[in-house]
Image (cartoon, helix red, strand yellow):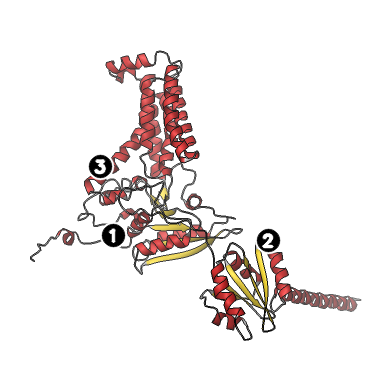
Amino acid sequence: MRRSRNNRSSRNKSSNSSNNSNSSQKTTSSSQLFPCTIDQLKQKLQETFNQSPDLSFQTFTVQQQKIAVFYLQYQINKDQLNKSILDTILSGNQQWDSQSILNKVPLGTGATKDEMDPIAKAIIQGSIGVYVEQDSEAIMFLAPELARRAVARAENESLVLGPQIAFTESLITNMNILRWRLDTTDFQTEKIIVGEDVPTEVRIVYLKDLANEENVNTIRQRIKELKVDDLPDSNILAQMIEDKSSSVFPQLLTTELPDRVCNSLTKGKVGILVDKSPHAIVAPASLFSFFESTEDLYMRWNMGTFIRVLRMLAMLISILLTPAYVAALTFHVEIIPSSLLVSLGKSRANVPFPPVFEALLLELLIELLREAGARLPTKVGQTMGIVGGIVLGQAAVKAGFTSNILIIIIALSALASFTAPSYMMGTAIRVVRFPMIILSGLWGLVGIILGLSFLIIHLMKLTSLGRPYLTPVYPFHLKDFDNSLMRLPWSQSTHRPLGNQPKKVKMYSEKKAKKKKDIDE
């Protein structure tokens, strides 16, 4: 009995193994598409692209050979299709195969593929496929017709001095601009594909002799670890790879200016470009880098320093001016001068709300006008912002909802927040202003000090790629003040920022920069 059971089990195992081998042979044979007929290839392509009407599949007969040409309409360059591929194949008087077509067609982008997945991916990217019936592989010629926006002036970071070009949605165009501006062999790029359903190309750019390898490795690791279906824009990528995404303050700088990216790369930073996005990411970034502008470099050093200090003061005014008004009227009336107190009393005589509610109401009104002006068309939005602010302000004063002085203070705070060159940082300042107003309404100056303490502690804990966010103030680096809070003359600006941890700190000799010669020497 035992022998018979063993024999049966052995027979079952042998039959199972044979079935497995047969099934594996069937799967391998089914996965192998080539060689095949033209009709089989057409059916397989239509199944892959879900019977898409954009898929063009044409069959030609040359020297009694059937040759198929397939591509996606509106995705390929028709001149290259007609002049380079079809004219060459149809005018030839020979037997074609994949190698002869590659040798005869005057395009250097041809490559042979023998599996359906690479063929489908190449078609999506703008390739033209050519297949000779019963051949062992198909030829894919990359000839995309990309809908690119022409290089134009920057709209969000407009400059008076310096280069006027901005990035576009084409990664090829953006890489050409950077290559043109950084004409050196040290310029390095790394390609990473992000997105499982919709693959998107991401490029890491840096100068090999300057960029810190730890920064490059951190960015590379964070991007490769992303498991997302789609990556629409570089601003979304910045939120995914920054150190603390829950903070209202951005930790990675996004810009549409190629000269700003190039200037950052020469200081040892790393740039990130995303296909189909007109913005680049610069890392690491500090709080003060969001208040810098490349226009500061093109001005004289004393004017550039004045404008940078003015932006810092504008940030403090935007955060503290309205809370100080609420705290003074609610808890600390004695600090207001007597002459100003009389006018304040007259303007607030008919206002039925407490100062904190009055301030929050007007701040919300300003934000609504700003958002409406940004979403409407340009001409209508500008008119809406100006006319709406004047009309609503006067109507609010006459109706007794607010005072004249508070309207001036709110307008100054809003104007100060717009001085930040970075749109993300300006938005963060406006968001921080609301909790500061609430704290000043609850506890007066004590609430303001409490809010500032929490804000400073939060900024001290923030990092960008592991680098301190408040550098060079914390940790303190006096030499880095030239690249953040102020500007020195070019003869004295000889060091790269230590906060970026560049490989080469010194740019050039200060003695040689100061040395001057007469014409006769």
Q: Secondary structure at mark 2?
A: loop
Image position, residue 69 (x, y; %): 64, 72
Question: Which label's residue is closer to the chain start, 2 or 3?
Answer: 2
Above or below residue 245? Residue 321 is above
Q: Is residue 513 left or right of residue 368?
A: left
Kindly give the residue lying farthest to the right in the view shown: 1
- Tag 2: residue type? Pro
**Mark 3 surroundings within 10 Å by alpha-carbon count, few (fewer than 14), some (14 through 19), many (20 or more):** some
- Tag 3: residue type? Phe
Spatial CA distance of label 1 from label 2 is 58 Å
Image position, residue 352 (x, y; %): 45, 15
Image position, residue 333 (x, y; %): 34, 18
- Quadrant of image for the N terminus: bottom right
Q: Which residue is mark 3?
A: 306
Q: Secondary structure at mark 3?
A: helix
Spatial CA distance of label 3 from label 1 is 26 Å
Question: Which label's residue is closer to the chain start, 1 or 2?
Answer: 2
Q: Is residue 311 left or right of residue 64?
A: left
Q: Which residue is mark 2?
A: 53
Above or below residue 20? Residue 176 is above
Residue closer to the observer: 50 or 452: 50
